[in-house]
Image (cartoon, helix red, strand yellow):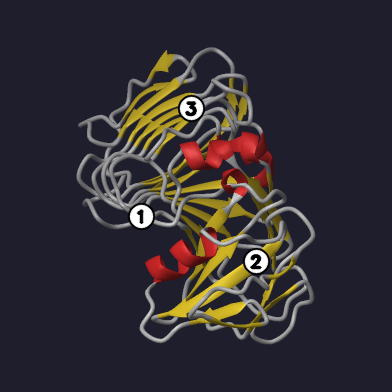
Amino acid sequence: MGDKLGDTDTLVLTGASNSGISVIDLNAADQIAQINGGVNGSIQTGIEILDLSGMTGTTGSTITGFSAAVNTITGTPNADVITGGTKVDTITASSGNDTINGGAGNDIYNMTDTQFDAISTANNGTIDLGDGTGDKVQIIGAGTIVDADFVDFVAGSVEILDFSTNVSVAVIGTNFEARGMTTIDSTGATLDLTMSGIKTATTGTSITGYQFNLAAEVLNFGGSAAAMNTTISGWTKSNGIYTDAGATVADFYAAIAGATNTAGEVGAFLDAGNMYVFAEGAATGAGDDSYITLVGVTATAVNATHNTGVIHIG
């Protein structure tokens, strides 16, 4: 089909598949071994990009991407087994119950909100993006994510949860924590994020793309949301923002977490262009405290009303 590795020869398959799975291996001399359960007699080679989203019927596919080249793969609407390689692969779901192994490299797995919701039942697919340090799951369109949706992600295989569309909503908790995700990216999107007991003073969740003065960009930690008003010896507080000359992030977290705070209050500290946020949660015990980092922003206040320079809490 194509003539060399590294260009963009694309195979688009359509039609009903009810008799058996399709088997495609981009490393093989004959890349398409089987279609709809039947052996493919013709030799197919030179394919770089796969799109099986137009397939119908009840059976899925087994797809093995290039082991040492970039893969761009879209699966069928049924249950697929997709294996990537060592480079930055882009895999797009057409179903919510796929078995994905991204391999090495910082892979991208694209899912719609509906597909993400479909994996909220244990053993309804497995998503393992492999050994990269910046593997990303990107929600296509506005997302409404709940913590149960993370149950079928392999722990430690996905670092970034990426929202790309305005008016997205997410609730994260124990399942999100257990999967080891470290960053939520809302660049170009608004996100209404609810969390409780997220991370610790040494492993806070990072939020990139946070925007000021948008009603739909809000952080919810539980309780009656208000700016932290706890007095801490040696620290100056103003509208929930704490300062202490020469203090570090560790100093801030130790001081604020060790103080007697009011439930629902949120405080923040600026260091090296990032805002480090501590939330007491709905109770005054440590169990529902949350620690997050707003990357690349400088706030002047914490408030339940959005405004310029305000960390918007709800």
Quadrant of the image containing the N terminus: top left
Furthest residue toward front: 233
Return the mark for residue 134: 1
Q: CA distance from mark 3 to mark 2?
A: 44 Å
Assess disc 3: are there few (<14), some (14-19) or many (≥20) residues with their C-alpha within 10 Å of its C-alpha: many
Q: Nearer the viewer, mark 2 or mark 1?
A: 2
Q: CA distance from mark 2 to mark 1?
A: 29 Å
Q: Which residue is mark 3?
A: 80
In the rendered structure, the answer to whether residue 197 lies left or right of residue 253 reads right
Assess disc 2: are there few (<14), some (14-19) or many (≥20) residues with their C-alpha within 10 Å of its C-alpha: many
Q: Secondary structure at mark 1?
A: loop
Please state which amino acid type lies under the numbered disc 3.
Asp
Please state which amino acid type lies under the numbered disc 2.
Val
Q: Position of residue 206 (x, y in %)?
A: 47, 62
Quadrant assignment, res 249 = bottom left
In the rendered structure, the answer to whether residue 199 lies left or right of residue 103 reads right
Q: Position of residue 227 (x, y in %)?
A: 70, 72
Q: Which mark is first along the chain, 1 or 2?
A: 1
Q: Position of residue 279 (x, y in %)?
A: 61, 60
In terms of depth relative to the viewer, which is nearer, 205 or 224?
Answer: 224
Please state which amino acid type lies under the numbered disc 1.
Gly
Assess disc 1: are there few (<14), some (14-19) or many (≥20) residues with their C-alpha within 10 Å of its C-alpha: some
User: In the rendered image, is residue 139 in sight?
Assistant: yes
Residue contact at pointers 3 and 2, CB within 8 angstroms? no
Quadrant assignment, res 82 = top left
Q: Secondary structure at mark 2?
A: strand
Return the mark for residue 266: 2
Q: Position of residue 173 (x, y in %)?
A: 60, 42
In terms of depth relative to the viewer, which is nearer, 286 or 28?
Answer: 286
Q: Which mark is first along the chain, 1 or 3?
A: 3
